[in-house]
Amino acid sequence: MVIDDVTAIAQEAIFTIIKCAAPLLLVSLCVGLIVSIFQTVTSIQEQTLTFVPKILAIFLTLILLGHWIMNNMVEYMTSLWSSFGNYIR
């Protein structure tokens, strides 16, 4: 195994992590922004107000996109394990 193989594996792993985490992070960011705007408009300054909507939005996103996220992770692991023989030479 040469350094190029290690770099390619690490690059693909990081890309897979970003691709799988991005929808959840974007949903959390948008919900947080909406709740912050709501807090500013209504002058409600409760620190824990963003927690429940964010958790509900993330759970809903996981329900909707969980299959896609799992398929991406399985696809990466399958490609990694299928080329395992090439890496141990």
Image (spheres, rainbow, N blue to C red):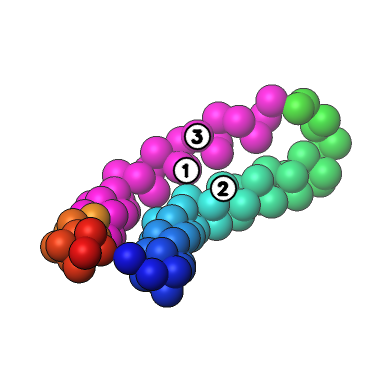
Residue contact at pointers 1 and 2, CB within 8 angstroms:
yes
In the image, taking residue 82 as reference, residue 48 lies left or right, namely: right
* Residue occupying the point 47% across, 43% down: 57
Q: Is residue 61 magenta?
A: yes
Residue contact at pointers 1 and 3, CB within 8 angstroms:
yes
Amino acid identity at mark 2: Ser
* Cα–Cα span, label 1 and label 2: 7 Å
Q: Which residue is mark 1?
A: 57
* Cα–Cα span, label 1 and label 3: 5 Å
Question: On the image, which quarter does residue 52 sit in?
Answer: top right
Q: Quick one: SS at disc 3?
A: helix
* Residue occupying the point 67% across, 29% down: 49
What is the magenta range? 48-76
Amino acid identity at mark 1: Ala
Q: Quick one: SS at disc 1?
A: helix
* Residue occupying the point 45% across, 42% down: 58
In the image, taking residue 19 as reference, residue 77 lies left or right, namely: left
Q: Is residue 55 magenta?
A: yes
Amino acid identity at mark 3: Ile
Q: Quadrant of the N terminus?
A: bottom left
Q: Which residue is mark 3?
A: 55
* Residue occupying the point 15% across, 62% down: 85
Q: Which residue is mark 2?
A: 28
Nearer to us in this view, 32 or 78: 78
Question: On the image, which quarter does residue 17 sit in?
Answer: bottom left
Question: Residue 36: horizontal and vertical position, in percent?
Answer: 74, 45
Mark 1: give few (<14), some (14-19) or many (20+) Cα within 10 Å: some
Question: Residue 81: horizontal and vertical position, in percent?
Answer: 18, 57
**Which one is in front in this view, the residue at disc 1 or the one at disc 2?**
2
